[in-house]
Image (spheres, rainbow, N blue to C red):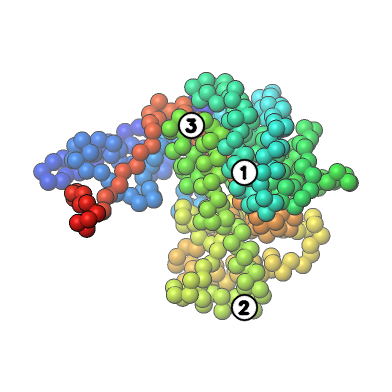
Amino acid sequence: MAQTATSKQIGTATLNYEGKSASLPVLAGSLGPAVADIRKIQGDLGMFTFDPSYGATASCESSITYIDGDEGILLYRGYPIDQLAEKSTFLEVAYLLMNGELPTKPEFAEFTHHVTMHTMLHEQIRRFWDGFRRDAHPMAMLCSVVGAMSAFYPDSIDIHDPKQREISAFRMIAKIPTITAWAHKYNVGQPLVYPQNDLTYSENFLHMFHAVPAEPYKQNPILSRAMDRIFILHADHEQNASTSTVRLAGSTGANPFACIAAGIASLWGPAHGGANEAVLKMLAEIGHKDNIPAFITQVKDKNSGVKLMGFGHRVYKNFDPRAKIMQRTCYEVLEALGIKDSPLLDLAMELEKIALEDPYFVERKLYPNVDFYSGIILKAMGFPTTMFTPIFALARTVGWVSQWMEMIEDPQQRIGRPRQVYTGAVQRDYVPVEQR
């Protein structure tokens, strides 16, 4: 697995408070802004720092993913996301994220073999599905099944054994498409379709998701390539909420399946993994291009509660580099499916055009993000909106696994323990109920 380079001290910052002084080492990584190391601030000054949601706090050192939100840059192990999306495959990107370098042909063949040989689920896991209601949300099933995998694969949960960590990583990446497809099949009442190891990663997922025993399923190379591209674009995204959740759970020594289940639960939130579903809901509510001006007026009204979904990003203050790739992919998919006239896409394009020209949104740097087009693509490919977030989880699993493995191998790793600013009652004495 990849060796993580460490940051270097490039200076010192001094903080003075009530006659005391703290000398804070200033560190720099290979890219990005410098950071002040505040680990000794409590001992030096008797205080903590306050950073709700950790928006200005680096929680770890990582060599996996780099984002420059102002410039609209996303790098996996130093490689621009647009190059990987256009030229690579998802499994090659998975190897890159896990190992730090692009594979040679023999390395990639071996890696693909290991993933392929783990695509099947333990047969007893099939019984899990019978315990769910037919209308259970697919994310509930993903959380449950992934968390339970440690009970079926106890031979790969020793986090101190490098070989077991590697086996659990392969199992996770290989089996999550099967779990995701089976969640859908259970929802719609169709037979569960087993994986076929002669197919590529994306082809296999599409086959398990769409195929039925009654007739052969024909692969469309344009659609499988689009699926692969969607997986690549969502594979990792630095220290977001779900990735941070995986790392925090992992810092306790929890087994890898429990950590990924925690990441899936975090991704389930509509502010994180459900944004593309929210875009489709917004477009449906707008209904027609003629209604866009009135909708924009509502968005500008802070009291209306109406939001422009699919625009803006917590990190990106420029174009989300993934959005441009997703836009091109959208046209390819619609053409491959023979959808010449797409009212949904036309509406999205007109909304994007108006929003990008409106000073209100330009000044606030609200540019389209990856979710703006991904929902349109997934809908066109036959995925119900309830499956959008599970597909996101499928793609992000390789990023979670890579981040988890990096954390386990980090000599600085300690159990995560954020502090707080206490605002409750001061100490007081218990009063018997008769005297209250």
Residue 195 position within the rendered picture, expressed as x and y whole percent measured from the top left: 76, 36
Q: Is residue 416 among what the camera can see?
A: yes
Residue 124 position within the rendered picture, expressed as x and y whole percent measured from the top left: 70, 32
Among numbered discs 1 and 2, the one appearing first in the sequence: 1
Disc 1 to disc 3, how far (Cα)? Answer: 18 Å
The N terminus sits in image quarter: top right
Kind of residue sitting beneath label 1: Leu
The C terminus sits in image quarter: bottom left
Residue under label 1:
142
- Residue at (62%, 65%) from the top-left corner? 281
Disc 1 to disc 2, how far (Cα)? Answer: 38 Å
Among numbered discs 1 and 3, the one appearing first in the sequence: 1
Disc 3 to disc 2, how far (Cα)? Answer: 51 Å
- SS category of the residue bearing label 1: helix
Check contact, mark 3 vs mark 2: CB within 8 A.
no
Q: Nearer the viewer, residue 390 or 280?
A: 390
- SS category of the residue bearing label 2: helix
- Residue at (50%, 33%) from the top-left corner? 404
Check contact, mark 1 vs mark 2: CB within 8 A.
no
Give the crowd class for mark 1: few <14, some 14-19, many >=20 residues within 10 Å.
Answer: many
Residue under label 2:
291
Find the residue positioned furthest to the right: 215
- 273 over 402 or under it: above or below: below
- Residue at (52%, 20%) from the top-left corner? 161
Among numbered discs 3 and 2, the one appearing first in the sequence: 3
Residue under label 3:
254
Number of labels in the image equals: 3
Find the residue positioned furthest to the left: 19
